Image: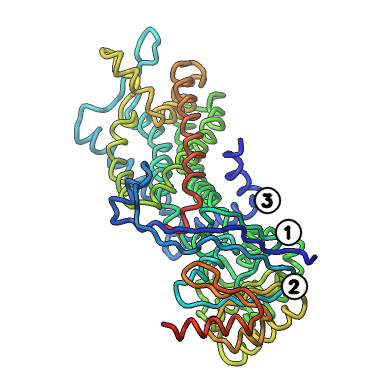
Amino acid sequence: MAEAIITFKNVSKTYILYKNDQARFKALFIKPKNPKTNKALNNVSFQINKGESVGIVGDNGAGKSTLLKMITGVAFPDEGEIIVNGKVAALLELTAGFSMEMTGRENIYLKGYILGLEDDYIKTIEENIIEFAELGDYIDQPVRTYSSGMKMRLGFAINVNIEPDVLVVDEALAVGDASFKKKCKNKIKEIISAGTTVLYVSHSAASVKEICPRSIFLKKGTIIFDGPTEETLKVYEESKKKK
Amino acid sequence: MILLFTIFKEHKGFGKQILLLAKNELIKTYKGAVIGPLWAVVKPAFTIFVYWFAFSCGIKTLKSVNINLGGPEPFSIDFFTFMFIGIIPWFFIQDSITQGAKTLRTNRQFITKVKFPVSTILTYTSISRLYVHIFLVAIMYVYVLFAIGPSWYNLQFFLYCPLMFLFFLALSWSTAPMSAFSKDFESLIVSIMSGIFWLSGIMYDSYGFVENPVLNFVMLFNPINFFVNGYRNCFLYNRPFFEYKTELVIFLAEFAVVFFLGIFNYNRLRKKLPDVL
């Protein structure tokens, strides 16, 4: 049997919608009675094995972001269990989590420490990151002086160069000019062929088909279909028509 | 014990990073200003001047303070020295309480966007305030050397200062997540701070309610008094920290309560933080 790298066991996540700020304040001390809730994920279970590339499709509000946030360890489930074995790199919000006053180089270390890497290891990938991000001398300038394109390039470069076990990619991602975009696409493909597990979120059927043999279709927090991409996309298209 | 675990686990292997981020926090505060780090001195110096002016020159009665340490005779100390030594820890305490409560909100990018050991945010911002505090204490000590002279009791600073750091760090484990949850809680803390200043023995002697023993006892429950009087033990009274045992015991009990409440509140709210910020 293949080795599971991500396991979701009956995972549910409910957001509480507080009526107003008073209700929020009260909730600090007393558990709110019958609050309005939004069930972002409802009893979701699946397993992703090492080396698999899985697409996640669904409309806005289907729970895709919540799902990804849980895999990257930002958000937590209310019920159920999530097991992720390995380093997760996320190409979601590339510019987030930078410390603006610190230099690009210091931010590489910051990111590395968060992922649990040692100094020695970071030193070995440092040059690759700087080279890939095409930052040149700017690497020793504070990140606040970077243009938004430079910040994104650095974010992307860090995430792809740490040799992640799981790579989470949002397709809506736009990184810099056309030539750099191409470089990014190639790098992602290279990572996939190296056997890294990839989670790919997209609205476009074509790009999912291109990258992922398996896909999961989410709708209103539940998994409607989980299987070969061809079939998943068929189900997805049909559900769109029904509307 | 499992509860304790989260905060410790989040700090494990993160020591170097905490120091780097603390330094970064300082840069963030003072960079871009012409006199830069000197601002850390200007503001407290001006505050001290204002209080000295108001009390010693304005309200002309307060040139000296009578101190009652339970000895046979109360003794008199020059008001400026008395206030100066007490207000230095207060600056740290004030910033720790108000800034500490706001910290998670101002650093929300680390909570909602990336996986980050959230409790270390409280630690590194606290350390950056500690740097400023130590700088101010150094300046104060120069004054103490000239005005009072050195004493072995000065070394008790190395007990009081870390204890103060830990106490207010543990307090922020409660206040910071709660403020992140509700802005009202944050505003509440900020608005009671000036009241707390006057309720603590910074401008007056908190042991000094001689005619009213009940009030004298109640004052011991204010942990700020413990530190303010503690600093005076080190630099002014030349008194060992264990001499007033009731005060010490009350403080230690409060510390334990704050510590465990902090751990409890942090664990209770940690996983909800990314949803509310």
The residue that label 3 is drawn on is B13
- Which of the labelled discs sits on residue A118, or is there none? 1
Foreground pick, B30 / A45: A45
User: Which element type, helix, strand or loop, lies under badge 3?
Assistant: loop
Q: CA distance from mark 2 to mark 1?
A: 25 Å
Q: Locate residue B147, reporting x and y percent.
A: 43, 30
Q: Are marks 2 and 1 on the same chain?
A: yes
User: Which element type, helix, strand or loop, lies under badge 2?
Assistant: loop
Tag in front: 2 or 1: 2
Q: Are marks 2 and 3 on the same chain?
A: no
Q: CA distance from mark 2 to mark 3?
A: 29 Å
Mark 2 vs 1, N-terminal side: 2
Residue type at tag 2: Gly
Q: Locate residue A106, reporting x and y percent.
A: 62, 65
Do the residues under discs 2 and 3 have CB atoms within 8 angstroms? Answer: no
Q: CA distance from mark 1 to mark 3?
A: 9 Å
- Which of the labelled discs sits on residue A214, or is there none? none
- Which of the labelled discs sits on residue A51, or is there none? 2
Determine whether A177 is above or below A162 in the image: below
